[in-house]
Amino acid sequence: MSDGNALIRDKTAIAGIGTTEYVRDIGRTEQETSLEVIHEALADAGLAATDVDAIFKVETPGEASISELAVARNLGLPNLRAWGGTDYGGGAACGPIVHAVMAIATGMASVAVAFRARNRGSGTRPWSKTGARVGSNMAFESPYGLVGPVQQLALVARRYMHEFGVTSEQFAQVSVTQRAHAARNPRAFFRDPITVEDVLASRMIADPLHLLDCSLETDGACAIIITSAERARDLKQMPVFISGASQGMGPRHYMMNGLMYKDDPFDMPPAYAAKDVYACAGMGPGDIDVAQFYDVFSPMVLWQLEAYGFCKPGEAGPFVEEGRIDWPAGELPVNTHGGSLSEAYVHGFNHVLEGVRQLRGTSTCQVENAEVALVAAAAVVPTSALILRR
Amino acid sequence: MSDGNALIRDKTAIAGIGTTEYVRDIGRTEQETSLEVIHEALADAGLAATDVDAIFKVETPGEASISELAVARNLGLPNLRAWGGTDYGGGAACGPIVHAVMAIATGMASVAVAFRARNRGSGTRPWSKTGARVGSNMAFESPYGLVGPVQQLALVARRYMHEFGVTSEQFAQVSVTQRAHAARNPRAFFRDPITVEDVLASRMIADPLHLLDCSLETDGACAIIITSAERARDLKQMPVFISGASQGMGPRHYMMNGLMYKDDPFDMPPAYAAKDVYACAGMGPGDIDVAQFYDVFSPMVLWQLEAYGFCKPGEAGPFVEEGRIDWPAGELPVNTHGGSLSEAYVHGFNHVLEGVRQLRGTSTCQVENAEVALVAAAAVVPTSALILRR
């Protein structure tokens, strides 16, 4: 294992986190909740709004855009020295933090905010606008019923079952495990335990994906404060160092579904983000104590277990079935907050917060002596990843 | 003067540039022209598409969005390790390059593309959609006739004349000077010389701005290749080192027009970008041999001459009138390609290309022995700047 990227590895840290409640209808705009969680994250870090000089956000075409300018003005910031957006929704769960790391590591900014606010519980889905034009590959796919992520991903899930003998029970086990984690988390939207039978008996949304294989639709917002490792050491919270940070896309990628376009439909973006995040941190899968994986649908957790090297291609089904992602008994507890399947759907930003809590020792499913956490964004779109260290 | 930011200063370089023709109706989509200019810039650098591992773009809500994913796929890239967008249109003329600098300086990527494509000659203006909703401060301003940048900026220009005794003739001189530069540039859309009288006799668009005080509306695209200084030394072109890079916004900023909101309406974003770009490069105004200033309307050049420290507040009018921005006689030739007033309106990206040409010694208004060029983005929106060195 190499020593990692000397300009990035452990040079920055997450100093503060903030989140709203996670509910179906939060009754406030995304801009309002963004400001709330940024204030909360600053208070958590022991910093003032006037300390912030960088903002990085998620930019998803067709969704409510929250301008850095409006955020800066409403926070009363004296200046912003760095800002920008990262596209691809759930794939950008770590992307804005990757950009903040680059800005701070180079001295182009000193305190950065990364945030995500999304009223997906009360608002509309991007694909639900009747008569909306779709472009690129989706123009060819949507007439055949692939109108939203669940239909698009269902085909990939079915092909994955076919290729590797993975079962619906194994998909369901992801939801069951994460619900058990959520049962201990007072923030989680769903906390009542479920069984594999419950998942299989839930309504079929797009074969083979049942309702309980699908993520929640909630309103909520999350913010994260990033600063230099040096400065973080003097702040209120124990710093959570950013050892590795990456974005990855891979070749010939199409949004959501590579089946029709790639020789190997399982050649997915996380394999590229994984290679770089491990190289950056100078670590490998064996160094990871706990992982938070983007989980818009249960099979995506399996694909990330494989892409991030915790098991070989096609072996994640049995891995999950054997309880190896369970807390506290598993070797790699996954989504200890309940994830998007049970805690909330904030496009994966809540997963970064849970990674931070694990290293602060404040998770409601605390992994004993957790030293290193992996946080990974969506598997089927251009993606991003972080390795965090206590 | 300090030694600058040791992690950024001269660590990266512009290795290639590409541009389309500049015409009223280019007959191809922004995505097509983007790909063309990226290929041209790569050929200029002597690099292959497969060398690219980062793409940074401008993200303007409401305009055609060009996905990094589609660009990467169409270029046949094996992977992207860094990407993102920068908002605020003309303020982002240098922003994507600032981000590319951070990515390459930290080793998060090795060869980055920054690009801008805009069919503003043949396409619609963002504010021209009848019945379109406007938000933020514009919701309060547009009912009073401030429907687009020309009306918004006209008020600022009038106030500037009132405060400092600047004249319409001085604004006009900017257009006249730049047209004289454009006369030597075969790429320029307008090349016929004009006089101050011509500008003042041209149609009044929004008092005090005449037609010839306003930038062109053209179709066109530009691309820039950024890599490490070390790698650039081995490539086809003489490297143009990036000594300074910055983004800046300032406090309480509103898009386009600070008159109604700020105590000092001339407390504009470039003052903040200027401070940081000089600090980064370890340079000051006295080190600059040639400047390319974003010039959507002629007064904006004056505001940047002041913000970047070439003259005191209110003194840019006489500075221009005295011929001090003229090529070849002036002490600081400005917009030697003709700028947006005469060459083309590619939202300021063409200004970066001209900065590069000056340092390569290939401008059609070549400043003798030019060693250092300043390139600055729009003055009235969150902005960005570069200092380039031979």
Image (cartoon, coloured by chain):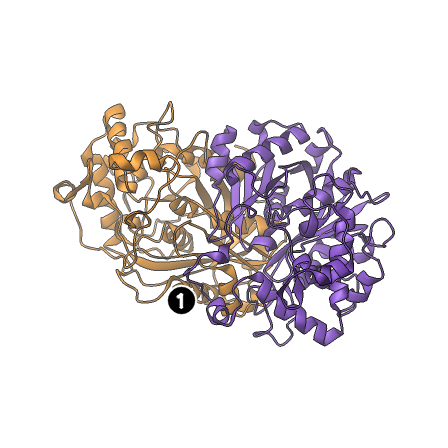
Chain colours: A orange, B purple
Residue shown at the point (25%, 57%) measured from the top left: A189
Lateral position of residue B58 relative to residue B329, left or right: left
Compared with residue B245, is residue A5 higher up or lower down, i.e. above or below? above
Lateral position of residue A105 relative to residue B192, left or right: left
Compare residues B371 and B221 and report the one nearer the observer.
B221
Mark 1 crowd level (few <14, some 14–19, many ≥20, 10 Å Cα): some
Compared with residue A357, is residue B353 higher up or lower down, i.e. above or below? above
Compare residues B241 and B93 and report the one nearer the observer.
B93
Compare residues B63 and A123 and report the one nearer the observer.
B63
Residue A222 visible in the picture: yes
Q: Amino acid at mark 1?
A: Glu
Q: Which residue is mark 1?
A: A32
Lateral position of residue B145 relative to residue A291, left or right: right
- Please state the chain letter of the residue tagged with numbered disc 1 in the rendered image: A
**x and y, in percent, of residue A341 in the image:** 26, 48
**x and y, in percent, of residue B31 in the image:** 50, 38
The quadrant holding residue A201 is top left
Compared with residue B57, is residue B273 higher up or lower down, i.e. above or below? below
Residue shown at the point (30%, 27%) measured from the top left: A314
The quadrant holding residue A266 is top left
Residue A48 visible in the picture: no
**x and y, in percent, of residue A71 in the image:** 49, 64
Query: What is the total number of numbered labels drawn onto the structure image?
Result: 1
Lateral position of residue A9 relative to residue B265, left or right: left
Compare residues A114 and B288 and report the one nearer the observer.
B288
**x and y, in percent, of residue A94 in the image:** 45, 47
Disc 1, SS: helix
